[in-house]
Image (cartoon, rainbow, N blue to C red):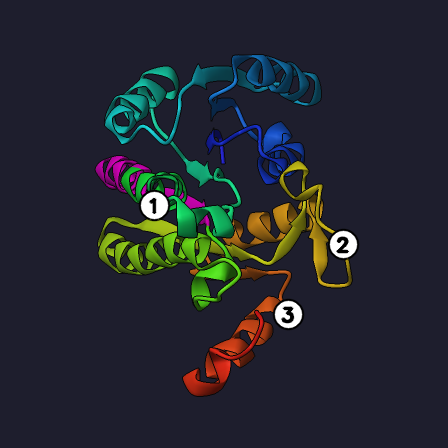
Amino acid sequence: MKKLLILGATSGISQAYLNRVADQCEHIVLVARSAEKLALLSAHVSAISKATVTTLVVDLASTEEHQQLVENVVTAMGSIDCALVSYGVLTDQARCVNDPAYAMAQFNLNGTSTVSLSLNLANQLAKQGGGSLAVIGSVAGDRGRRSNYCYGAAKSAVDSFLAGLRSDMQKHKVHVLTVKPGFVDTPMTSDFKKGALWASADKVAADIDTAIIKKKSVLYTPWFWRYIMLIIKSIPEFIFKKLPL
């Protein structure tokens, strides 16, 4: 992997992934909406690797900017070997119920914009004749639960889209990976009480690295979430809807 693109580069998982792979890269493009955070991250990546680092300040929720963004990335690097899509926010479920406008804005951020960006990136990789696209979703997308169904619905849409995209892109030798983390200890979840099911960003980043190398289709990380969600999906609806999940 010589040319790496990270979208949502200032997220905890993105930074952990960069710490693992930066020294393997020749050119890295970092995309996020905070110029200040990007500058700090760029300096860090330059300190731990010899890669050329380019930063682009973009609000990834703005889908109308996605095509130009990809064109700018290709102008900077020439091509893309691997793209990691790693951005989003945890949605306030209670606010969603009472504020549909907020709910739709959150759906766009966590769902629609990811679909748009993934399609633009996949088309570029197809044009090149190959490459890897890794997109971070969530186990929350596996089944709607009363505690986070607005967030889960967005991730479910991403999951379904990527499954179809993966099938469609195989003829172009484009690898599409859906990453489904469980609870991850990052700044975004700093207010949550941590327990045995929580994983570090470093652990998730290591799993993503391995999954990209092995060209896996779907990654549950840590591994046990595959079986937790299998159980949750197997509960009959008449029972499930009564559970305080």
Q: Are there few (<14), some (14-19), or many (20+) residues within 10 Å of tag 2?
A: few
* Residue 125 is covered by the magenta coloring: yes
Looking at the rendered structure, the secondary structure element under dot 1 is: helix
Which is more N-terminal, label 1 or label 3? 1
Q: Is residue 167 above or below residue 14?
A: below
* Viewer-proximal residue among 128 and 159: 159
Type of amino acid at the residue the image marks with label 3: Phe
* Residue at 58% from the left image edge and 75% from the top image edge: 227
Labels in figure, total? 3
Q: CA distance from mark 3 to mark 2?
A: 17 Å
* Mark 1 Cα-neighbour bin, 10 Å: few <14, some 14–19, many ≥20: few
Label 3 vs label 1, nearer the camera: 1
Numbered circle sitting on residue 100: 1
Number of the front mark, 3 or 2: 2
The secondary element bearing badge 3 is classed as loop
Type of amino acid at the residue the image marks with label 1: Pro
Q: Position of residue 237 (x, y in %)?
A: 42, 83
Residue at the spot x=38%, y=29% of the render? 60
Question: What is the number of the mark on residue 194?
Answer: 2
Judged by its main secondary structure, the magenta piece is helix
Q: Position of residue 221 (x, y in %)?
A: 60, 59
Q: What are the residue bounds of the magenta stretch?
A: 117-136
- From the image, tell me which residue sits under label 3: 224
Instruction: Examine the structure image and report whether residue 6 is included in the region drawn in magenta.
Output: no
Q: Secondary structure at mark 2?
A: loop
* Image quadrant in which you'd find residue 194: bottom right
